[in-house]
Structures are given as C-alpha cells and as structure tokens.
Amino acid sequence: MAQLPAHPSLDHLRRQARALQRAARMGDPAAVARVVTAFPGAEASKLPLSHAQTCIAREHGLASWPKLVAAVEAHRAGPEPASDSAILAERWFALAELEDLRPLNRALAVGKARKEAARAVMQRDAARYTAFQRTLVRGLASRRDRERFECAGALDVFGGAWTRAPLAPLMDDPVPRVRWMAMHALSCHGCGEKPGALEPRVRDRIVEATRSDPSLRVRHHAAAALALAGETSAIPVLRERLEAETDQKLLRGLAWALASLIRSSRPDKAAPASL
C-alpha cells in the first residue's frame, strides 16, 4: 500500500490517475492488473477516469477519490496551530519547573488580557498549576528584592487562597516596593482570585501602612489597596490622612481611594474599578 508523501500534491495524483487510465486502455499488463485488483471483472480497455482515480485512492488505503482528496487537504493543512494562550501557558509551566525565577518573571511580563487567558489554560492542569504557584511562593523568600517584588506581583494574578499566607509577611518587607506590591496582590479584586473581604490582620496591616509607613509611595499604594478591596471600613482613616498629609501626589491618591470607597458604599453604585 502506498503512503502519502510528506507534501502530497493533488495535481500529481491526478496525473497518476490519467497515466493509469491511458496505460490500462493500451493493455499494459501492470496497469490492467492494478485495475482488476480494484475492480474485478472491469474492462480495462474502456476504463473511465473516475475508476482510475478510485484505483489510485485504494492504493493509498482510501475507499474513494473524494476521500483521498480530503486526506491530502487535511495533510497539507497540518494540525491546528496552538493558541497564544496555550503557548504562553506551556512556556510558563516549563520555566517554573526549572525553578529559575529570572527568565520566568521576564516571560510573565505580558499584557493583562493575555495573562488571564493563559491562566485559564493553566488552571485546567491542576497539578502543574499548583507546582507553578509553589515556584512563585518560593520566590517570595529570595534574597533579591527584585525577585520578591516580581513574584508578589505574579501572585496578584496567579495566586489562590493558599498563597495568601506566605504573601502576607511581605507587607513588612524592608524594601518599600515589595511592601506595597504585597498589599496590592492581597487586595486587588481586578487582578486575580481574592476573598470577598480582607482578612482582619491583612486589613489592619494595610490601614497601619496608610497611616504611618515611612515611604510616601507605600502609603499611596496602601490607600489604593483599601479602595481596590472595597474596604469601606477604611473611609474614616482616609479622611484622617487627607487632613494630615501634605504631599500633593499622595493627597490625590487618598482622594481617589476615598471617592472610590464612598461610591462602593452606596447600594446603587458599582464597586471601584481596578487601577
């Protein structure tokens, strides 16, 4: 039985059928034998082209010429290309399995929509997804503050209920940007799976940071975290800080957070949008 070549051509197969028809009509013994194998009792001298095409198809293991045509077209089309989401998911899984955080965190630097679509693909494989999360959690203990910062940011999107406990201590990290990223990752409902309300200890730590963190930027992000979590209990704290702070950028951030929480506290208003 003949096999289709790596790059089959319908034109070539049609020429084979015509050549078989001509040879059979001329009485070529090999051609006649091929025709009789496919059509016992057939009159080779009057072989129609359709029968010759069927012979070619059957010699390739297919019942008819239309089925051979379909097989050639499917062969040429090849497998459906993997989606962008599937490619990203497999790449991130592979990098996490190598436990090399630098290339993993670089690879994770894609747009939010692509990241969320790839996450949905990854979550179909629960075991690999949990292993991927574990790699990010291990990165929270890195000696490099950049890796702690990046892994906390990744867990904002890829974290789950069990990753919150190891993430929470980073709210007390010595590096300001790690502190505020941990607060954001624990609070922003617009980025990943978050509980309906902040755990009391998480809420209290973010409130404390809004009031007294030595970094202006951490205070700014802490206020935003309270708004993104819909923590309306923090409205009095934000009003207090608006009276006490003097930095204009921080004041604008506090005003935005306060306005967002006031809107979300009204039953007819939607929750605050993510940053």
Image (cartoon, rainbow, N blue to C red):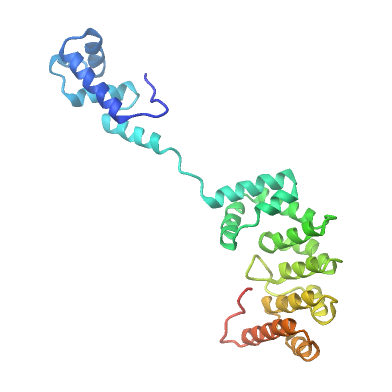
Residue 117, given in percent of the width and then of the height, sits at 56, 58
Residue pictured at 76% horizontal, 64% vertical: 164
Q: Residue furthest front?
A: 248
Closer-to-camera residue (172/195): 172
Residue 229, given in percent of the width and then of the height, sits at 69, 76
Q: Residue furthest top?
A: 29
Give the answer, above or below, for where 247 lies relative to 167: below
Q: Quarter of the image containing the N terminus?
A: top left
Residue pictured at 62% horizontal, 79% vertical: 272
Q: How many marks?
A: 0
Please indicate, yes or no, whether residue 184 appears anywhere in the rendered image.
yes
Give the answer, above or below, for where 99 lies relative to 223: above
Q: In the rendered view, does 109 fall on the left or right side of 20?
A: right
Give the answer, above or below, for where 85 lies relative to 112: above
Please indicate, yes or no, whether residue 41 appears anywhere in the rendered image.
no
The image quadrant that residue 50 belongs to is top left
Q: Quarter of the image containing the C terminus?
A: bottom right
Closer-to-camera residue (269/154): 154
Residue 190, given in percent of the width and then of the height, sits at 62, 70
Residue 129, given in percent of the width and then of the height, sits at 66, 51
Q: Residue furthest bottom?
A: 243
Q: In the rendered view, does 159 fall on the left or right side of 268?
A: right
Residue pictured at 74% horizontal, 82% vertical: 250
